[in-house]
Amino acid sequence: MAGNLGAIQELAGNVERFAGKQVRDEVMQGSDPLKESTKPDKLAAWVQGAMQRLDALVDEPTRRQIMGECGYNCARVNSRPLKAALARRARFASLDELLAAEQAKPPPGMRLSREGEYLYQVYTPRAFSHPMRCYCSLLRGLPQGETTSRTYCQCSRAFVQRYWEAILGKPVEVELLHSAVAGADQCGFKIRL
């Protein structure tokens, strides 16, 4: 299921799957009136509150699992970036050639660097061709000066993980380093090759 409501339903299902129905009911408080047409600031405010409730009710490993499953689903639903990356990968004989090309000409608002067995992928959402607060449509309306829990960004971490697993053809570890919606200037991920 695509769209904002699909993502919210995915969150509800993952909370129930990993933390139970009672926790799901508490985390999802206030989600019933949300619609695809809900204004971005109202949607972001609800997500901000849902993450506060999730943080209060669930331990960190379970929160990471819940939001990770959301990110894996997002990668399935929004497969265009992965397909484009695979097409770019096919044009190069080696991973080193691909990484050199990606570092030399990154998309607006993005940067990639390599240090030994680690890649560092950085996004600056406000520097994208269409500046935004967050790449995810659920948090694009988060007002300047407002932050949300890094828990939410475990979704992005999982998306980045699926992205690089597709390119590399093997499992990778990805660590969330910093998050624009949690107060940093940019979003950063450390990928172990």
Image: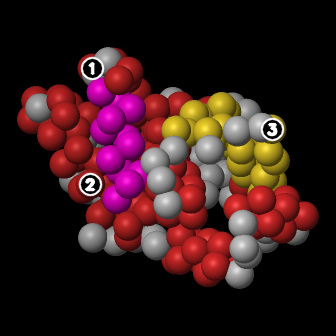
In the rendered image, which residue does mark 3 sit on?
115
Q: CA distance from mark 2 to mark 1?
A: 18 Å
Picture layout, residue 151 above or below residue 141: above
Label the magenta part by its dominant secondary structure: helix
Q: Residue at x 33, y 47 (%)?
A: 69
As shown in the figure, which amino acid type bears the numbered disc 3? Answer: Glu
Which one is in front, 46 or 1?
A: 1
In the rendered image, which residue does mark 1 sit on?
57
Q: What is the crowding at mark 1: few (fewer than 14 residues within 10 Å), some, or many (at least 20)?
A: some
Q: What is the crowding at mark 3: few (fewer than 14 residues within 10 Å), some, or many (at least 20)?
A: few
Q: Residue at x 35, y 30 (%)?
A: 63
Q: Quadrant of residue 62?
A: top left
User: Does the segment drawn in magenta span residue 67?
Assistant: yes
User: Does the segment drawn in magenta span residue 82?
Assistant: no
Query: Is disc 2 placed on a helix, strand or loop?
Result: helix
2 relative position to 166: left or right: left
Q: Which residues are magenta?
A: 62-73
> Count of labels shown?
3
Image location of residue 8, percent across then percent down: 31, 54
Image location of residue 88, percent across then percent down: 68, 77
Which one is in front, 155 or 192?
A: 192
Q: Residue at x 78, y 52 (%)?
A: 112
Is residue 1 visible in this depiction of the protein? yes
Picture layout, residue 28 above or below residue 103: above
Q: Earlier in the sequence, mark 3 or mark 2?
A: 2
